[in-house]
Amino acid sequence: MCGIIGVIDRTMARMDGSSIKKALSLMDERGSGEGAGYVAYGIYPDYSDCYAIHVFFDNLLEPKTNVDRILQKWGRIVYQEEIPTYEQPNLKREHIPWRYFFKPYTDLMVGTTNPDDDNVKRLVMTINSTVEGALVFSSGINLGVFKASGWPEDVANFYRIEDYKGYIWLAHNRYPTNTSGWWGGAHPFNLLDWSVVHNGEITSYGTNRRYVESHGYQCTMLTDTEVVAYLFDLIGRRHGLPSDMVVEALAPPFWDEIDEMPEKQEEFMRALRLTYGPALMNGPFAIVVATKDGIVGFTDRIKLRPLIVGENDSKLYISSEEAAIRIMDPDVDKIYMPRAGEPVIGRVTQ
Amino acid sequence: MSLGSVPLKYKISIDRDQCMKCMRCVDNCSYGVYRIEDDKIIIDSRKCTACHRCISMCPRDAIMLQERPVDYRSHPLWTTEAREDVINQARSGKIILSGMGNAVDYPIIFDRLVLDACQVTNPSIDPLREPMELRTYIGKKPAKLDFTMKDGDVELKTKLAPNLKLDTPIMIGHMSYGAISLNAQLSLAKAVAKTGTFMGTGEGGMHEAIYPYQDHTIVQIASGRFGVDIDYLERGAAIEIKVGQGAKPGIGGHLPGEKVCADVSCTRMIPLGSDAISPAPHHDIYSIEDLAQLVRSLKEATNWEKPVFVKIAAVHNVAAIAAGIARSSADAVVIDGFKGGTGAAPKVFRDNVGIPIEAAVAAVDQKLNDQGIRNEVSIIASGGLRNSGDLAKSIALGADAVYIGTASLIALGCRVCGSCYRGLCPWGIATQRPELVERIDSDVGSENVANLIRGWTLELSELMGAAGLNSIESLRGNRERLRGYMLDEGLLDVLKVESVGA
């Protein structure tokens, strides 16, 4: 199961986290109280030129010393602090959430056209695969992931997410099967500017994982969802495909449909499928991906998981359930169900 | 001094009560097991190869075959075969010839791998209700897509290299006209045309009768260059350079003069009745850069319109060699495992040289993946694939498609007697004798082979659906859908597969 919801205000007007908390909590039926999380874009305007690196530390001794050392070697820590949290009776504190505001040294990275991002991507991979007791779970600019094991309202209250204001929010209510109770296993997953919430199971995970590993990513979070963030980073950021095209690569039309397309479009789709065959995602899933520029929601090619869309003026909602959208925005004026594999895209209008 | 005779391999007997003396056995046996004397069928069991032709043609089920009717003193090391090979070589002083694939009882890795299926957390997909995509493109793929956007219109800048489009990831491997008969080859050609896939011509040129199906053929260039001219290259849908063969890595080939009839001599462009000897190496390929040059030359000769494959035997260093091939302009690497069949091979090679296809394909897939170029080149696995289970496992271990050989011949009647090199195949497959060749009707034969491909294709769809996959790309290299059962840790690591239960 799992429940997902995402919202964007296309004018970049910022919303606090109280309404998405309500929406996610409404879908408790879809979770099991073992994992929930939120991500918001636009929450750190004071540090809008820094990567906000959120880390789960098992303790603040060796793991933190090691992470400090790695970060200071590759860039400058502008500010750091423990992420403020508030004890909840039903939530067991497993880790210490910490945040760094970090500026990478651009000149240290060679062989790339995007040294800042590639530097930070490398740091995330290095820390997560080599530093015991530390897990980077959020690494974008002016955005932050807040997640833990627990029910949506407890996790929201633990971080007091109503104190944050963002123009994009994604949230996820987890029913774990792969890795129960592990904070790192809760959604959203994030890498750099990409955040992902996912309901379902990716049966092509083995193939997708080998593909991203082949291009320098390391899957360390023991769950199939992180691979989606890496696929978007690889195809979207590094290869430069726009979001709708990335979705077409991950959930492409069937060959029978492609064969019927006009010649030019047919050639393009064939090229896309041949090039990104190992990125094709199979299995039942509904996914919402966010970047600073917008959100995109899509399902697997035969829509084995629910996804519903709501619109109200500048706001676009994507969710597992209509009720969750309606409780967030009782005035929502358009509700519809996208077709299998069809991307639903909300872009900021600026 | 005489070494005397060795005991019979097979003993044929006839149930005389059942026998109605229809003489079909006498007519059908090309090895001369049966003859008539005084209206009685006399049996010479020593000539029998267990090809089952007589048994399958007997209308009364009157013929019995017993393997090894005479026991040797049993011994775990000095097996019957070991003793007889020594006796044979003591007599001849020659290399022992053999046919078909590796006949040593090595463990079969395919049988120690199990596939996955969905339960609860993900639904299985019913191929009868939902689309199931087996379409496979073989050839070079771009590493990334280049395009420009103009007013919302996408202009593709990447130029796609020519790929073969397969409706199912099953192709028929290279068996030359010469090694097999024209009717056998024609049956295979018609079958691949019917099923939307491809077959290899082998190193033997292309007979005119195959021309109507040439768009479904892959023409082969091997070290003897038999039958190769520009016309041949242009007829094939793709070109394959054969460097090695799984049944006999490191050595060449030898088509005995008896099989070189008038037609074969014309097609191969060699004198009638002469032995066709393919040297061990290509004498213009002494290094990887030589191979890259030949690949480019073939592409240049055919206007860069055809994919070029390179076939190698699965040997110890197969992964590194494949990585070298992937760096040339080659479109696909064909890997032939040590259980692959052959018309004729020295027995010591067939049984002792090379590695299994399962390990080879996994190692190649891993090496190319480590180097970030896996998707840019196709991998074709061959060598002892028996059923759709082996097919699905090959793909999950990293193959794009497979070649089948022996299985397609069994669909034409072959009973794997392993006497192909003798040129007397009573099924009309591995022979050039007109009276034997005409036993194959290529319309019927092609339907049998096409049925086999269709059957495996259906089964593969079901296996994929059960595993929650509706596209073959998502099975390719997907080790998550495989588990090893009773495989040791070393091999699990090579295959990159977890143990059952893990």
Image (tube, rainbow, N blue to C red):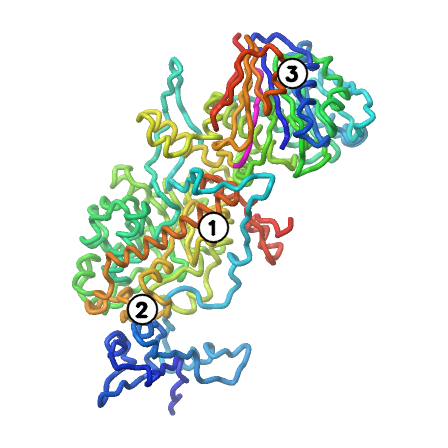
Residue tagged 1: B394
The chain letter under disc 2 is B
Secondary structure under the numbered disc 2 in the rendered image? helix
Real-space Cα separation, disc 1 to disc 3, in angstroms: 50 Å
- Please give the label number shown on residue B421: 2
Mark nearer the viewer, 2 or 3 = 3
Residue A290 among those drawn in magenta: yes
Q: Main secondary structure of the magenta part?
A: strand
Residue A82 picture location, percent across and down? 78, 20
Residue at x-position 37% and y-position 82%: B91
Residue A50 picture location, percent across and down? 65, 15
Q: Is residue B326 left or right of residue B184?
A: right
- Please name the amino acid that badge 1 sits on: Ser
Residues shaded magenta: A283-292
Q: Where is the N terminus of chain B found, in terms of image quarters? A: bottom left
Residues marked 1 and 3, same chain: no
Residue A329 occupies quadrant: top right
Residue tagged 3: A327
Residue A61 occupies quadrant: top right
Residue at x-position 69% and y-position 27%: A28
Real-space Cα separation, disc 2 to disc 1, in angstroms: 29 Å
Residue B131 picture location, percent across and down? 42, 38
Secondary structure under the numbered disc 3 in the rendered image? helix
Q: Nearer the viewer, residue A319 or A149?
A: A319
B343 above or below A276?
below
Point out the tag, 2 or 1, that comes first from the N-terminus: 1
For mark 1, does the 10 Å Cα neighbourhood hold few (<14), some (14 to 19), or many (20 or more) residues?
Answer: many
Real-space Cα separation, disc 2 to disc 3, in angstroms: 78 Å
